[in-house]
Image (tube, grey):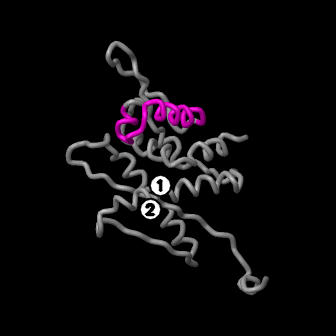
C-alpha cells in the first residue's frame, strides 16, 4: 500500500481531521489535544499514533510535566500542502470523503450566521480562469495556515476553511441521458 493511500485512510476519521486542525497553529501533546476535543488522553494518543505512522503529524519536541515528559506533535502542513493523493483507490477516497462530510456537518453546527461564504457549483469555465481560481484558493489556504494560532488565543477568532476544487472528467453530453 502506498503512503498516499495509507495517509488517506488515516485521515478518514473525523477526530483525526480535528487533530490536524488543532496542530496547524501550534505543537500540542496528547493531553492538550484530549482537553481541546473532550476525549480521553488514551484516545488522543491512539489517533496521534495513527497520524504519525503515515507522516500526517510529526514530533515537535518534548515538554516537562509533573516529573515526566510529554511528546509534542505538529502538523507538517507546509510540506503536505500540495500533496497529490490521486493514486488512492476509490474505496480509500470514499472513506476520506465520508469523514470530510462528517467534519463539515460538525463545523457547520458552529457556523456564525452571515460570517462566511458558501459555494457549491458544477461549472464549465475557461482553462485560464480555472488555473487562476485554483492558484488563488491555494494562496488563501496557505495564508490562513501561516496565520494559525494556538486554540483559545486571545483576540483570535475560530474559523473553518474547506475547499474541494477538482477538474471533472469530460463526458459526452449525448450519452448522459442514455442508459
Residue 173 falls in image quadrant? bottom right
Residue 50 falls in image quadrant? top right
Residue 159 vertical position relative to residue 174 in the rendered view, above or below: above
Which one is nearer the viewer's eye here, 5 or 147?
5
Q: Residue 98 at what x, y percent from top left?
A: 57, 57
Identify the residue under disc 2: 136
Q: Residue at x 40, y 22 (%)?
A: 70
- Quadrant of the image for the N terminus? top right
- Quadrant of the image for the C terminus? bottom right
Residue 177 shown left or right of residue 42 in the figure? right
Identify the residue under disc 1: 103
Confirm whether the magenta stretch covers residue 98.
no
Q: Residue 48 at what x, y percent from top left?
A: 50, 34
Q: Residue 40 at what x, y percent from top left?
A: 43, 34
Residue 73 shown left or right of residue 97 in the figure? left
State the predominant SS element of the stretch in magenta.
helix
Secondary-structure class at tag 2: helix
Q: Residue at x 54, y 47 (%)?
A: 13
Residue 51 vertical position relative to residue 17 in the rendered view, above or below: above
Residue lying furthest top: 67
Magenta range: 32-54
Residue 117 vertical position relative to residue 7 in the rendered view, above or below: below
Amino acid at each position: 500500500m502506498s503512503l498516499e493511500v495509507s495517509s488517506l485512510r488515516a485521515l478518514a476519521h473525523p477526530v483525526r481531521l480535528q487533530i490536524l486542525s488543532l496542530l496547524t497553529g501550534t505543537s500540542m501533546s496528547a493531553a492538550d489535544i484530549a482537553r481541546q476535543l473532550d476525549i480521553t488522553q488514551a484516545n488522543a494518543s491512539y489517533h496521534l499514533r495513527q497520524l504519525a505512522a503515515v507522516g500526517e503529524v510529526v514530533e515537535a519536541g518534548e515538554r516537562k510535566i509533573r516529573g515526566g515528559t510529554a511528546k509534542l506533535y505538529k502538523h507538517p502542513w507546509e510540506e503536505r500542502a500540495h500533496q497529490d493523493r490521486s493514486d488512492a483507490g476509490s474505496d480509500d477516497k470514499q472513506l476520506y470523503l465520508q469523514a470530510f462530510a462528517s467534519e463539515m456537518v460538525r463545523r457547520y453546527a458552529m457556523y456564525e450566521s452571515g460570517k462566511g461564504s458558501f459555494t457549491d457549483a458544477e461549472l464549465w469555465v475557461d482553462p485560464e480562469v480555472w488555473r487562476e481560481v485554483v492558484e488563488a484558493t491555494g494562496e488563501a489556504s496557505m495564508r490562513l495556515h501561516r496565520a494559525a494560532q494556538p486554540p483559545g488565543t486571545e483576540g483570535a477568532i475560530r474559523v473553518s476553511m474547506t475547499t474541494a476544487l477538482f477538474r471533472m472528467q469530460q463526458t459526452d453530453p449525448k450519452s448522459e441521458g442514455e442508459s
